[in-house]
Amino acid sequence: MGEEALSDEDRRPVKERRHLTVMFVDLVGSTGLVDELDPEDAQNVFDAFSGKCAQLIKQFGGYIARIEGDGILAYFGFPSAREDASEQAVRAGLAVAEAVARIRTPMGTSLACRTGIASGSVLVGEAYTSSGSIFYEVIGRAPHVARRLQEQVEPGEVAISDAAYRKAGGFFVCAPNPPIRLKGFRNPEMFWRVRGHRELPLRFLARDALQRCAFVGRTEELTVLHRLWDGARLGQGAAVGVVGPAGIGKSRVIYEFVHSVAEDSPHLVLMQGNTHHRNSPWQPLRDELIRHLDTATPPGGSRLETLTRELASSASAQEFEDAQAILRILEDGQSGVAMSRPGEERARVVAALVRRLEALAGRAPVIVVIEDVQWLDDSSAEWLEALCRVVERHPIQVVLTSRETLSARLKLDVTEIQLSGLTQEDARAMVDLLISEKPFAHLDAQAVLAKVGGIPLFIEEYVTHQLDRVAARKGNGDGREVDPDDAPTTLMDLLNERIDELGPGKAFIQTCAVCGDVFDLRLVARTVGVDVDHAIAVISDLESRGILTGSAAVGDEFRFRHALLRDAGYSSLLKADRAALHGRIAQAMETYAAEDGFAASPEVLAWHFSEADDVEKCLTYRLAAAEKFKGQYAATESIHQLELAAAEADAMEEGGRRREWLVRIYNLIGATRNIFYGWGDQVGQEMFEKALSLTVSSDDGRSTFDAVRGLWNANMIQGNYPLVEVLTRQLSAIAARSRDPMMRVDAANANGAYRLWSGGFKEAHASFQEALRLYGSAGINRAIGAQGTDPGVVALCLSAWNFWFLGDREAAFETIKAAKQRSERMQHVFGLAYSHSICASMWQCERNPEQALAEANQSTLIASENKSGMRYWIDRGGFLSGWAISFSGDRQAGITRIRNSIDSYKSSGGGQLLPYARTLLAECLLASDLLAEAEAELTQAGADLPSEHPYYYDSERLRLHGEVLIRRGYETEGAEALASALSSAEAFDSPPLRKAVVETRARLQRR
């Protein structure tokens, strides 16, 4: 026997009356198993059976009351009541039957179970097991009916009582069983055999405002909106949210408010969040802009001209640049643009979009309505937050609707109006108004309210359905009145029944539902296979029935009256039919886009092909969407598409192109994370490791190279030089077998960088010159690599620093100047941060704090303004600017900055720069006569160095260590350290490093 324990919080009173759904599961043939199996084997079978049943019952919200070897008793709607308790019980029963059938006995046979489910009023009370533990026992008909029902069905079947069927039968395919007398019961019992799922889930989503009857109630809410509008008209704008669950009337309140202020002639900006575009950046803004510009742009004019005119009254003097920035979000992004100042460009777009509304507000007060904020994409949410921060200075009122508190989606405080159900008086008035529209109908208003309560959507849909049934009976000569008790017991059942009543229009509405919340008339016509005129006629009928809304005269775009209707149509389809429709719609979208220029978003196409189980096409469009979003500076959305693609590719059957897709996708995730979050990103490294583990051999070419290159970056940042050496050789070998110039340039750069950091400056020089030769001979003018860098800029930057260590100062500064110019010409933010940071290092080596500070600050500024990451350059800039500040006179401020940057760098998993940064810090401490602290940092820098591996800056570490020791009185040890520094500099064959050691030794001798 086993019982599920409850926490103290869930403990129930000793006895209480409740309405529960009870399930009893019985293992078929348990006696035979005990007879034929060894006791231990039999126990293992029973444990597998009870364990799987318990797992699934809990998964569906059930409470395990008792386990008795071959039988399980469970309650649904306990310890907390659930309106879908019966539905979940049946779902659990089907899942249990399927799972148990997959359990095999030692004899190789399959198990089977019978399940009975019954609902009813029971008395729940505490009881005690023989061991003294508490469990909850129920007294009533339901547990006994459940136990007896399972005896009436075949193995693998689920039986439910008539009471349970009335509550949940609409969700399943059920067969009625003639009433029979169950053992122990006096009267015959009606029950149903469950054949499978019907998939009619209960979901209530947002809907458009309906105008079937006069608006009632909501006086207080409208008063708040009008008070805020009065302030907005005077230039003191505000943002306000109308919050409440689906169907509560949010859209209708906004509709009434907007129409009530129409005499003020406000400029209306209307946007809609959409569940299918939660990961599509700027989508509500794009939709609003396209609608507006298509209307406002005169024949022969351009969108750019229209936007520039609109922006002319803003406080900014850059109307043309703002218009260009805004139009960028209407274009598909390109990979080159994605890595060209993504953070700066994104900020410019946000600011320009805000200035556009400020400009509109300069002509007339503006009302911005955004529905379903909970479904906004991250980019639109960022713009909304920026807008809300400035509205108080302008005649702009922002009105939002959301199902959840706005603080859950937006990072700001917004006045919220919480909507609840209508009062009894207002609900009754609404019912009366609806009924009055059809005087031949006779409905009991009080009975209606008893059924649906005060939720406007429930009221309207229920009454409309009843009135339609009255009209149908009148037309058939049936004079009977409709009994409210004959209505479906749930709103979702009601919606599905309305769709079923559409007759020939049902297939059409199902297609519309699969298209999405908003759909294109011509796309639906192509999918269904009818001409546009026929489609318009069908949609006009659906509009008259209150199913759809829209206009064929405005962009052929339609939407469901509310999303619940769309869900009902969607869920009424069988999975196979649904998948087939998704595939047909996707194919129609491709054809439509090719022939008529239809805007087929790759993320929407990916969704359709995914639902159609066409994985190859789905993945193709997922990757296209990721590339598009990357070009729109939308890191989160881009990576999300790639993660979806990875999950879908991983679910492919072994063989075929599964491995090829996974390698490609993992590489793209790693590279994209590198671009936005830095080379040391741990998740990015894991992605490259996954990609490499799936490559058959290094002959896999580009994919293998990209994976190895990603791992090379990660391990270089971490300072794992032995592995970097191995990876460097792998890159060179793969590139040598390839004709791809980018791979060969990248491999030469990697080899040069490894040699530079290892102190092999001459070998590094040869590699960088080879990279630049290959780069030039290939005629590459702009080549952002997979890791977010231009290989030409990388070669120039590292070659410049390498020149300095070789003693060619003139070549060093000429080369870094060329790197800056190339990055500026490309508008490549990564290259700019890179080149300024390397230049700062060179000036630091020159002991020029003024120039070093200017370059370090410029690099840090560029990296900090980029919202997509580049933490590496921020930390590196902190090391160098700290050194420069310290040697400019503010010792403590500089030391503090370096320490903070070291902490930040370490927290990101970095290790490569630690010896370098600690050496800079030690030099600042030495200049401040903090000798003990300087020695500690130098000692730690030595500990941070890779074991038995040369490090390019070790000569400087040893030089400073020698000076510290001598100044502390340890002459012999200091002299030995200086000798080691000189040996290191000579081994590296670096005249500047050698010169620094010689000059330090001479200066100390003079002291």
Image (tube, rainbow, N blue to C red):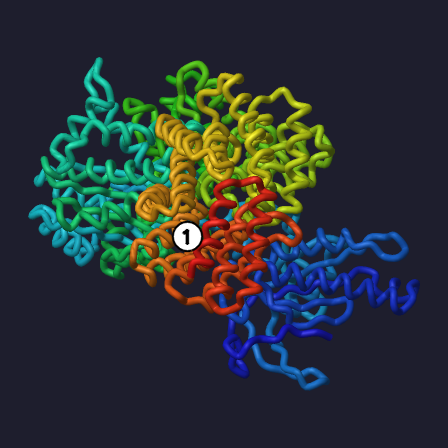
Q: Which residue is mark 1?
A: 879
Q: Is residue 552 visible?
A: yes
Please tell me whether residue 677 is drawn above or below residue 73 in the rendered image.
Answer: above
Foreground residue, 649 or 149? 649
The residue at the far left in this view is 234
- Which residue is at 45% across, 42% downward? 676
Residue extending furthest toward the front: 1006
Image height check: is 362 above or below 334?
below
* Quadrant of the rendering where the N terminus is positioned: bottom right
Q: Residue 961's spot in the image, x, y percent?
A: 51, 60
The quadrant the C terminus occupies is: bottom left
Q: Residue at x 68, y 35 (%)?
A: 730
In this rendering, does residue 565 appear at all?
Answer: no
Query: Which residue occupies the foreground of this view, 193 or 842?
Result: 842
In the rendered picture of this protein, how many numbered marks are placed on residues? 1
- In x, y percent, where is residue 802? 50, 36
Q: Residues within 10 Å of mark 1 (few under 14, many from 20)?
A: many
Q: Amino acid at mark 1?
A: Phe
